Structures are given as C-alpha cells and as structure tokens.
Image: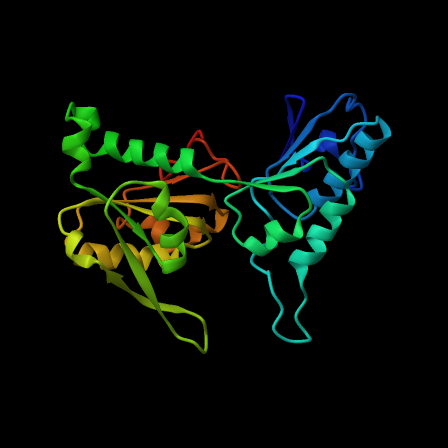
Amino acid sequence: MFRIKGYEFEIHYTNQTFPDGTLNLNGMDLTGCTRIEWYYDNDAELFTLICLAKKCAEHNCRPILYMPYVPNARMDRVKKESDTFTLKYFCDIINSLNFLSVMVLDVHSNVAAALLNRCTVIEPTNYIREAVNQVYLLTGGNEGYSRKEVMNKFITFYPDEGAMKRYSSLLDFPYAFGIKKRDWETGNILGLEVMNKEIVKDKNILIIDDICSKGGTFYYAAKALKELGAHSIYLYVTHCEKTITSGNIYYGNEIAQIFTTNSIWRDENDPRVKILEG
C-alpha cells in the first residue's frame, strides 16, 4: 500500500491496473511530491515504487521514501556460492531511485541500514511505550488502580540476547530474557530457557521484539513464562507479518493481546492484533 499527498492506494484494485494486470497510474498528480510512503504488501509493489520515483523525477521532485518495513532484510548475508544476496540487490534498486532520504522503522538487520543510501532508522520507542500503556490499562488502569500500583507488578521480556541489548535501554523496567534451544540441523526452535527467572512469578509481562512471522519463538517464550508463574502475557512486535494467523500464538491463550505497528499488519478490526499509533 502506498500513501502519497494524502492519497492511499493498493495496486491490486481494478482502477490501478489494466485488464492484463499491468500497472495503471494514469491521473496521479505527483507535482510537488515531497514524501512517498510504502507499506509493504508484496514484491510487485517495487515496480510501482520505481514508476512513482521516476515520475517524481520528471516533475523535478526528489521525495523522501518512508518505508517502515524493509523487504528482504532476512537475507542479509550469503554463506555459499549458490546463495543469492537479495537484500543487497533490493537496496541497489532503492539507491538507484535517488530519494532524498530513506526512513525505516526498527530495521530487522543493520546490514539493510548500511546498504541503503541516506538511510535514517527510526527507533520504535514511542510504539513500545504505547504498548506498555496499553498493558497498564488492561491490567488495572481501566479499573482505577494507580500506575505505580499496577506497574509494580509489570516486567518486560526479551526472547533473546539480541532483543535484550536492542530494547532494554528504551524502558526503565525490570526484565528477563530468553536463550533459544534449537535443533541446529533443521533450525527449528525446541524450547526456550528463561534467564533472571526469579522475577517472573505473578507478574504481567510484555514480550518485546522487532518481527513476527508465525510466532514460534514467542509461543515458546510465553509457555516458559507461564510455567514460571507469570500472570498475563502480552506481545509487542514492530513488524507483524500476516503469517501469524497460521501459528499457535494467534489461536492459543498463552498471550492475551498482540500489539504492532501498521508497517505490514493493517487489519484494524482484528481482536487479537492491535495496531498502535506511534
């Protein structure tokens, strides 16, 4: 989905395509365009972005690209000759469009930020604080309890050391973190060991991380926390992929509520996933 000069559109709508399925951007006024917002849905949108950027250049406009989610960020390295460095090639295309700057939100890989020219990484601090506020409201704030009283029973949890190093400095709350147990042949997560587990019992917990696909990591984290006596568990992820609906975390009761941004997830009416305003 794109937003330009207050106008939102998705390319699968019939008025944005010709009968053969090719792109139809006729009638779009890009004069004076200073900002293109791209909320990733699929790779076909990249061609739309190329056309929009080139049309802006024809109007002597050099807009900012706001791209909260960076596609291909998972493929941020190659280990053997047969691997394809898709993140690099994607960033090469974005760089060729010569945006004034590229703004990304809580990028999944620092390699992506390094490969993008004139890149600014926006920290998810405001979103995480709003998630904390939502947990406060859901665990006593809506019933008139003071913030201090409610938050004395609150901690954060980071599913691995990377997330702990990345986010713990953004909040001033006690926290625990996890160490994943993997089958190194398949890469599958077998479980999760909780560190600093003595602070978990009877606490309301917000799990914090950057991205979720099916949510296996968070499912095992919530199970481990429940076994340690945690009360209610919530999850914040900056980027929530649609595949979450095929995972145990979406249909189970281990996690009471999932919070995210609109970088990928855009269903405002889903009862399980709540979009936050940053």
Residue 230: where, in percent of width, then height? 18, 50
Q: Residue at x 13, y 47 (%)?
A: 202
Q: Residue at x 65, y 57 (%)?
A: 87
Compared to residue 144, the image places residue 251 above or below, namely below
Q: How is the image coloured?
A: rainbow
Asked where in the image residue 35 lies, by quadrant, the reply is top right
Q: Residue furthest bottom?
A: 185
Compared to residue 95, the image places residue 179 above or below, namely below
Residue 275 visible in the picture: no
Figure quadrant of the N terminus: top right
Q: Judge left or right: residue 55 versus residue 107.
A: right
Residue 121 visible in the picture: yes
Residue 39: where, in percent of width, then height? 59, 38
Q: Judge left or right: residue 258 versus residue 52.
A: left
Residue 235: where, in percent of width, then height? 34, 45
Q: Residue at x 32, y 40 (%)?
A: 171
Figure quadrant of the C terminus: top left
Q: Judge left or right: residue 70 versus residue 216.
A: right
Q: Judge left or right: residue 57 versus residue 232.
A: right
Disc tally is 0
Asked where in the image residue 236 lies, by quadrant, the reply is top left
Compared to residue 145, the image places residue 110 above or below, namely below
Q: Nearer the viewer, residue 274 or 109?
A: 109
Compared to residue 182, the image places residue 205 above or below, namely above
Q: Residue at x 16, y 23 (%)?
A: 144
